[in-house]
Image: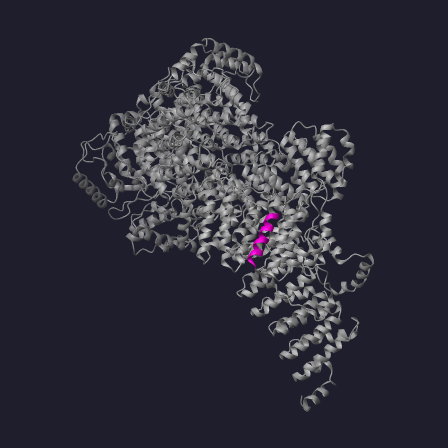
Amino acid sequence: MSTEDEKLLKEAKKLPWEDRLLHKNWKVRNDANIDLAALCDGITDPKDPRIRELGHFFKKTVADSNAPVQDKALDALIAYLKAADADAGRFAKEVCDSVVAKCLTGRPKTVEKAQIVFMLWVELEAVDVFLDSMEKAIKNKVAKAVVPAIDVMFQALSEFGSKIVPPKRILKMLPELFDHQDQNVRASSKGLTLELCRWIGRDPVKSILFEKMRDTMKKELEAELANVTGVAKPTRKIRSEQDKEPEQEVEAEASGSGPSEESAAEVPQEIDEYELVDPVDILTPLEKSGFWNGVKATKWSERKDAVAELTKLASTKRIAPGDFSEICRTLKKLITDVNIAVAVEAVQAIGNLATGLRTNFSASSRFILPVLLEKLKEKKPTMTEALNNTLQAIHKAGCVTLADIVEDVKVAVKNKVPLVRSLTLNWVTHCIETSNKAVILKVHKDYVPICMECLNDGTPDVRDAAFSVLAAIAKSVGMRPLEKSLEKLDDVRRKKLSEMIGVSGGGAPTAGAGAPSSGGTVSSAEASDGGFVRRSAASMLSGKKPISAAPAAKKAAPAKTVAGKKADGPSQTKKVEQPEDVEPAEMSLDEIESRIGSLIQADTITQLKSAAWKERLEAITSVKEQVVALQELDKSVEILIRLLCAVPGWTEKNVQVQQQVIEVVSHIASTASKFPKKCVVLCIGGICERVADIKTRAQAMKCLTTFSEAVGPGFIFERMFKIMKEHKNPKVLSEGLLWMVSAVEDFGVGHLKLKDLIDFCKDTGLQSSAAATRNATIKLIGALHKYVGPDIKAFLSDVKPALLSAVDAECEKNPFEGAAAAPKKTVKATDSVSSVSGGGLDSLPREDISGKITPALLKGLESNDWKARLESIEAVSKIVDEANKRIQPTGTVELFGALRARLYDSNKNLITATLTSISALASAMGPAVEKASKGILSDVIKCLGDNKKSTRESTLTTLDAWVAVTHLDKMVPYITASLTDAKLGAEGRKDLFDWLSRQLTGLAEFPDAIQLLRPVAVAMTDKSADVRKAAEACFGDIVRVCGPEMVMKNVRDIQGPALAIVLERLKTHGAFPEVHENTRTVPAGQPLKTGSKIGKSNGHASRHGSRSVSSRAVSAKGSKPEPIMSVQDINIQSQALINVRDSNKAERERIVVRRSKFEELRVEQIQDLENDLMKYFREDLHRRLLSTDFKKQVDGIEMLHRALPTIAKDLIEVIDILLKWFVLRFCESNTSCLLKVLEFLPEFFDTLRNENYTLNESEAYIFFPCLVEKTGHNIEKLREKIRELMKQLIHSYSAAKTFPFILEGLRSRNNRTRIECADLVGYLLDNNGSEISNAQLKSLKDVASLTAERDGDLRKAALNCLATGYKIFGDDIWNFVGKLTEAQKSMIDDRFKYKAREMNKRKEGMPGEARAAALLRRSVRENGSDLAEQSGEVSRSISGPAFTRDIYTPPEAQMERHPMARPSGGVVGPTDWNEALDIITYGSPEQSVEGMKVVCHELAAATNDPEGSLMDELIKDADKLVSCLAAKVANTFDFSLRGASSRSCKYVLNTLMQTFQNKRLAHAVNQRTLDNLITELLLWLLDERVPRMDDGSQLLKALNVLMLKILDNAERTSSFVVLIHLLKPLDPSRWPYPPSNESFASRNMKFSDLVVKCLIKLTKVLQSTIYEVDLDRILQSIHIYLQELGMEEIRRRAGADDKPLRMVKTVLHELVKLRGTAIKGHLSMVPIDMEPQPIILAYIDLNLQTLAAARMLTPTGPVGQTHWGDSMANNPMPATHSADAQLKQELAAIFKKIGDKQTCSIGLYELYRITQLYPKVDIFSQLQNASEAFRTYIRDGLAQMEKNAAAGRTPSSVPMPTPPPSALNLPSPKFAPLSPVHTNSLNDGKSVNTKMDPTSFSLPPSYAEDDMSSSRGQIPVQSDDRFPSGVSSGTLDAIRERMKSIQLASAGNPEPANQPMMQMNVSNEDHESGQPTDEVSAVNPNPVHSGVLPMDEKALSGLQARMERLKSGSMDPL
């Protein structure tokens, strides 16, 4: 060092520490750090103030950029930390951050010092800061810095232990290190993981970390974990504990106990995995998953999925606390779910929640526990297993203690189900065994009495469980608590209990007793004073010796001995040897010599050590002689082997000495009674090397064989695997494999781990580069093939093809012998087999695949995407292949369940793939597949019903695989059931019979095949020839393998033609004559006597046929077999099934008790039923029906079912007996029998319906009460079937008559029954509401009362029912619900509001509106009066018989009826529109209701989507529909008049109403159809019998409203034409036969009056609908009417005041008034050139002249524009004929029309025409006084009209949507001429001088309703051929000429008053007001001002207000 440097350093020493340490010269800094280190070394007191002063310097010094200075700074820091105490931790964070940032990437020495610094910080208890720094260090991008960080964490954990260094923090850091790109980091992270395993155990580490690793790392760690042994213990203490260390050492020396004893006494630390993981919130994701909707779903699969999601979320290790109360309440309900899969899932979810929440789940656990214990009655294994696991989890998690569950256990052990009692006690046993002694001492007094009581239980399992509880208590707290109780027991029970306590007591040693202890703790001084040894985490990996907690030391041996002594005891049970017993401890030669004593002479041992080989040879020979001479060799085996291994040892070079050593070892192994495995371990390495030497090979192989005999070949193989893998000499491997070949041949494979052996062959032997090794391996595989068969090849699938072919060749040389290949040698060691698993009887091992059957896989099998389903199916096959096609059944139950669903997949390819997977599973699983598959075989067989041949072939392949692993007898029941399934199809049955024949061909005897006899016999009568042929072939095989005798004994159950065929086939086998011979020995009357005796002895049912012999019970004691088919039995089957000759049905019905409440049949009733059955039913049938065997009962039902079509009428005679028998079956509740009954009943009632038979009252009272009560059956499937049956009976019997029975069900004690009945009431209201009377509706109070019930489902059902009623009745429903509490009202009101919102959302209208739209669901509007009532026809009382009349049927229907040879009965539930129309047309009234339902549904759907394609389709069939319904009106009313329900009448009127509510449909109705319909409706309105019908007044109102709707919406032209035509007298055939007091003339008059009123209705609105009608056709109909009358008749009627004639004149007058002279342009269909001229022309001219004279008609300009306005209301002054005056008048009239919302569209159109005719006229000058809004409206309206005109649309087709603003004070012209005084102008207006507007005809109040908007066009209607023309039509040219002359005349003579009038002699006519006469008096209206109508404005406003009230229904009609 230069002088300057020395000077600088000398000067620097004077500076403060901070300046020196941060000096710019590195030498100064370096020197300062050295001095600082020396200073710190001199500090002895941790409280020295310099410690605090110097601490903040190190943050910067350790970050020095100069490496040597940095090293010195670290040295100073180390010295500082050694001197400091925990108080220095305040500087830890900043110093550690600097070290992490600058020191971990430095030189190795720097890194090492940095690690020492970190360790010292840990020692100073700054662990959190240390771990924070490590979190930053491992995120360093430089891998070089990451590895030291991992190593220092590893070392800190290893030395300080998990109490100081929390594993939880380290566990969080590891996952991101597993995927690090640097392999050194990954290796270190694996080492750190292994160290964690030593401290907290393997399982917690694996469960937390393994799911975050890649598969390769998992495999590597799994392999390394096998080497982790021993228990980890800390070797270093923190500083605060070191202060106490000297005192502890002094105390230890004083007590004389060494550290080894202390360590032996310590128990390894147990760390709860629960504390290592962070809590996870599952409530939030559960909400998002739709859990709450899912658990309320009706489908079980949706409920299961919802709970499965909860189970999955709750499977996390630790769940964050929260509010789980609602979830627990839901799970409690789901535990009792009817679907077992849902219940199991709920139980598992509870277990997961308990495990994850622990004590936070305590309250919920106690809440659910009673239900769980009650559910233990379930016998399903899946449910039992789930319950046991959950109950154990609840206790293990600490949710409940033994004290908490006492009361629940007391209740459970008193349960009536023994299974609940036994399993509850078993759970208590488990709880006691897992609880500590203190807890049991507190509660044993509660449990001992419970167990003592259960010892007297009648069930053995319960008694055994009670014994187990007592034994568990005794084991835990001793016998003292049981002493008093044992005195009460008898000797047998006391002895049994003592034995159980003795066997189970004193068993397993305490944990850690036999564990090797670690060495003593390393002191802090050792670790710090240069003794720091840097350990890498990667040193834990690969090939090292087994890792223990500390380096093995000799000092540990005494501790092991002590522990071993503690563990041994007289009561210690035998158990699997632990690894430490196998691994020999080290022993020096001196120790061996001292222990060998006098066994071997000392000279001999000395010679063995000699360097001369001859002396060693002589010595070993002497040893051999001395060993042979030993008498008791067993005690000296280990020491002798140790001596030989030490001297001469296995390193001996002389071959002869080697040979002698091996022989001595072999002698000892073969002679000793027990040869320890330690000795094998000592010798095996050397022996394997000697095998490789040709000179010693023979002796070595013989020695290995001797070892195998001593300890078993499995242990030898296992040890050799490790040696041969690692040995460098390839000969060791090849020759060792050859010895293994001989060992397999000698010992077989019973003691081997075949999986390990095969893996060794694959991974080591076949992969070797040495050919000798590969050949030896192939020979070994061939030897294995001899014992395990070809299945071994599945494990070699990934071997190279060349090697695989060599293996195949070797296997051919060693064919599979199976059981015949007996081993040549045996194993002496009795426990050798217990140490081996996976071999032996099960041949090759099977792999557990339950871990691979993940929820994702199962969910994929149920995915909506077929590709996902296919991938999951393929994944199953892949799993099987990966398991080498050898799997265990564990955990495959759910997999088979998911695959079962795929067998019904819509994608046929997936079905084939599923069958392939099932086949693979069956082959891989073996015989266990039968139980694991849960009956999937029946679903597999059903696939034979598929049409695709490939699917059937796959099914047969699956059956082949199945029968290969199970026996055929296990498959026969599934096959038998499938053969009776009609869905199997002919091809499927043929294939199955062929397959059965192939299977039976290879069997000589197979008694179980007799089960196939019946389905085979039935198939021999199949209509398919292929099936018959295959069945006959199979029948022959059955006879062969069962024998003819057994077949004959089982032909009893065969009936009909099949029996004859079977007997015929049996003749060829010689069995039939023998049977007849046997039957002759039995007296003919004997069977009957036996039967009668048995029948009398039994109070409930006869027991015929109780002596039937089983197919297997062939007499072995020489007794003669019973005859099965007697001659009498054969004769019986030829008789009729039902005998009704002496039926006294009326007498039986008389004694039926009519009660709505169900009561079970009494004994005397059952006896009467038995007598009736025997009297009226054939013997073989009533024997089956009265049998106590439900299978016979099912056979009886099947007999009835098959014969049902032929015996329907006979059954009607005995239907009461049959119904009683059904009631009896419902009471017995056998599920199989009930299912068959419920399968039969729907068809039975359908048959009755086809026979037009309805249950009478007594029959209803027999059956309905029982059926209603059983709607609440506890089995969901039965409930569904009963529910559907009830709905069927409601339709076929009567809703009104069924209603009382259902109401009685609401009072049932069964909650399920009440729920179902509430649903049925809702169904009745929704579908048959109109049939239920108001008196019955008041019973809804019973439904409303259910809303106060506690059961939530019952309340929900009641609310749903009331909501349905609210939908139909609206607020009127409150009138029926009775008195309710405020809470009930609030609940119901909330439900109603929700229903209203729901209806609004679905566009169903408002509640109650449905009744107005449909006759079945509404009450007719109160203001809707009846036409017939107004005419005075209804009120009359009618007496006398009901008359029928001819029903008019359209010719089209008559013609179409013939080819439709359709049966009238049996039509139920049409499937489409056309079928519905057919049923309506040809079915009976009741049957046609079903068709009308379909029609109404379609109409409603089309109405909701008016622009859709469905409406277009319906329009095409509208005319056909109305034609059918018109014909059906008369049928239904006649049917009801004969006493039937009016239901069909209401349906037909409702359907017509729905049709005519839609204008498009109404316009599509043909004129002829409309004629028929209107005629029919008007006739029934007048029919005096209708009011006396059921609901007659309602029907009359419905007819009236329907008639009004037709007039409103039907095509108006057709309506006019039809009604004018109906003014003529009606054909008498259309009327009913006239009663004596009324003539046809009077009837016709009433009919005409109704027609006139209808025409008034149409004429009233003609002013606003003039552009919608075809005037030409109306004028034609008027012309025809007038022409047919003739002038003479017209004059006569005019004098008689004939209403029809006056109505026709009124219509014509109105038309002329509205159209003016333009009316003459609409005479194209009137033959105007006929001679004489048509009468109508004279009337038109007369009307024109009269109106013109009255100033009501003015010309409007050019030709063709002859539309005349109403001048009377617009022109107060005398008419001026100037053009301007006329134009102003015209405009004024138009503006008034525009001002009225009813005529604004017409007015705008006319105004638009004015603007076109007079473009120069300023129309807005007329509107100077109008508001700007009105002017704008006019302007916009004209623009719109111009667009419409350009598009070719008339104003009627484009109505104005918005009425004009009320700016102009213009009253509505629609009401202007009306007088509020006159209500019926037809009757009152007789004066010719009374002038009234035709629109003033007053109609009945029912007509006063809003006018419907105009239709968008007219549908062409065909001309009516039934209307006679009356005149011959002219040619087209003549008509055109006539029209032209009319137009010219009109143009040339604008003043109609000046034209000459046609002279007609009509002066005597008495016209109605408003009609012209010959003498027209001048009309002089009062002059009024412009814009004011000639009537009182107040009167007008009053009239309008009244009309508005009338429309809204708020005013009663007049």
In the image, is residue 658 part of the stretch drawn in magenta?
yes
> Magenta residues?
654-668
Any part of residue 141 in sight: yes
Q: Specify the principal SS of the magenta part.
A: helix
Q: In this view, does 1929 lie to the left or right of 923?
A: left
Find residue 2001 and report its horizontal and vertical position in percent: 47, 40
Q: Residue furthest right?
A: 254
Can residue 852 be seen in the rendering of this structure?
no
> Residue 1516 is drawn in which quadrant?
top left
Q: Which of 652 and 1390 is in front in this view?
A: 652
Residue 700 place in picture, x, y as percent: 54, 52
Residue 1992: percent from the left, percent from the top? 45, 41
Q: Is residue 166 left or right of residue 793?
A: right
Left or right for 1149, reference 1972: right
Quarter where residue 1474 is shown: top left
Residue that lies at the very extreme toward the bottom in this rendered image: 3
- Please give left or right for residue 836 compared with residue 361 in the image: left
Is 1852 placed above or below 1602 here?
below
The location of residue 425, given as percent across then percent down, is 67, 35
